[in-house]
Image (spheres, helix red, strand yellow):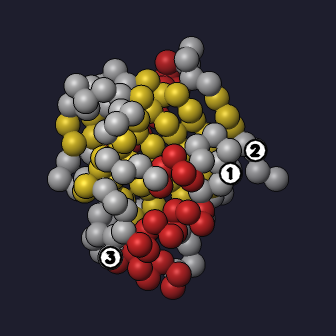
Amino acid sequence: MVTVLILSLAGCSSQNKWLLNRIKEKMIIDLKDCTVEVYRDTHGGMSDGELLAQVKCTAEQLSYVSENWKKLPISGTLKKELSENISSSEIHRSDLLTVKNGYYCFLDRHREATDPHNETEFSNINERYSYNYSVAVFDSYSNTLYYYELDT
């Protein structure tokens, strides 16, 4: 049985900081003073699960973005994988996948990944026994960062 954790983080500053630091570490982006609006984590005892977050930022708050961020749209294989796997009622697929103006960053955290930010290597994902990746999408119109992790 998987325990689902859904939090409204307005008053949970330590949880907020943990999540923002996690995103910062994985996506190499500084989310100074950004606000977590939605957080959902289904990871269980075996570390399998999904993590989804929606973070509100202004352009001024995004003080550093690495060269691993690319201009949208998301590539075909990655977009297909995301649309098949995101299962949250809090952050709908359409929110993350229909962003038209902004940037995205992909991180393949699987041990077989030779270039973790190269999504063309991701095309062989169905040949693996497990999936471990993170994707962040920043919507320039709404100043919203969507973050998704999958671990199987």
Which residue is disc 1 drawn over? 45
| Residue placed furthest toward the bottom | 127
Kindly identify the residue that appears in the image at 58 percent across and 43 percent down: 91
**The disc label shown at residue 120, or none:** 3
Return the residue found at the far top: 11
Which element is circle 3 on?
loop
Query: Which one is in front, 97 or 48?
Result: 97
Tally of marks: 3
Quadrant in which the C terminus appears: bottom right
Q: Tag 2 or tag 3, which sits nearer the N-term?
A: 2
Q: CA distance from mark 2 to mark 1?
A: 10 Å
Whichever of callouts 3 and 1 sits on the residue coming sooner in the sequence is 1
The residue type indicated by label 1 comes to Gly
Q: Is residue 26 visible?
A: no
Which element is circle 1 on? loop
State the CA–CA distance, disc 3 to disc 1: 31 Å
Residue at the disc numbered 2: 3
Taking the spot 48% from the left edge, 28% from the top edge, the residue there is 36
Residue 63: image x %, image y %?
20, 31
Going by the picture, which residue comes out furthest to the right?
A: 1
